Image (tube, rainbow, N blue to C red):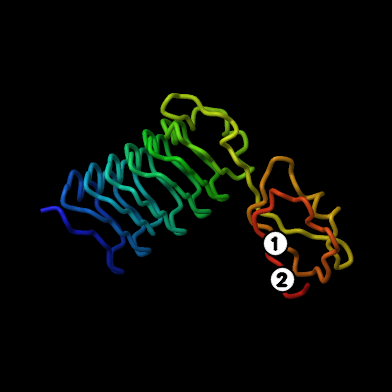
Amino acid sequence: TVGYGVETTDNIISIAASIFSNNTNVISVAIGKSVLTIGEEAFNACSNVESISIMSKTIETKAFYNNIAATSLIIGESVESIGQASFSGCIGLKTIIIPDSVITIGLSAFYDCNGITSLYIGSGVTTIEDSAFKRLSNDLTQIALPYSLFSYANNNKFTKIDNTLDSTVFKFYESRIFTGTNGTLSSSDVNGQMIADVAIYYGTISDTRHKINANAFTTNAKLYSIVIPPSV
């Protein structure tokens, strides 16, 4: 009978390979922080799983391959590695957020996830292997990438179903600490740290600043958020 969820307790440190493979009774999966590794094909082809939450460290090859009913995916801040074809074929996913903790996204990790319309890749990612995000939705509107991965925008890692990808869907971002001189932050300091066509998603003003001059951030449309310290 379809209808039960899989949730790990604090004493579980690993999920065995293929343990729930092809299980059509599971409808949700919640992996806690105590788990270090989700084994290969652990939840492969669990076709009735609707929601997946992962707080483990490593997701191995094809761990959630072809979970076609999944519409919700939460990848926790503890995850460092997303293995080969981990979520390939999860056609129901719409928005993917890769947290800053992730370092590596494996070969074909999200291949043929052709429902994805929005994708955010965290600033900790240093490696995206080939075909990691191929055959995304033709309705894809945004791929947010850290500026450090600028060179990844036009290669074999991202495509839509029809194999095209307009470069305008790529949005690049950085996190910046805005500094000034003599305890003051002015527009020249701010503009000097901005990069053309790169959004500053997370801006922080140095806690050694005591004053923000008039018009310091005027017309900076690419600034998404700013943190002002108590020292100002």
Residue at the top extreme, as displayed: 163
First in sequence: mark 1 vs mark 2: 1
Kind of residue at disc 2: Pro
Pinpoint residue 55: horizontal percent, then vertical percent.
39, 59
Comparing 137 with 159, the one in front is 137
The answer to whether residue 20 is above or below residue 210 is above
The answer to whether residue 209 is above or below residue 90 is below
Quarter-wise, where is residue 53 in the image?
bottom left
Mark 1 lies on a secondary structure that is strand
- Is label 1 in contact with label 2 (beta carbons under 8 Å)? yes
Query: How dense is the environment of label 2, judged by Cα within 10 Å: few (below 14), some, or many (20 and up)?
Result: few
- Residue drawn at the location 36% of the way across and 56% of the way down: 54
- Residue drawn at the location 36% of the way across and 33% of the way down: 112
For this view, does 36 lie left or right of residue 16?
A: right
Residue 229 numbered tag: 2
- Residue drawn at the location 68% of the way across and 61% of the way down: 226
Give the residue number, with chain letter if any, for mark 1. 204
Mark 2 lies on a secondary structure that is loop
Kind of residue at disc 1: Thr
Pinpoint residue 209: horizontal percent, then vertical percent.
81, 68
For this view, does 151 lie left or right of residue 158?
A: right
Pinpoint residue 99: horizontal percent, then vertical percent.
49, 53
Q: CA distance from mark 1 to mark 2?
A: 8 Å
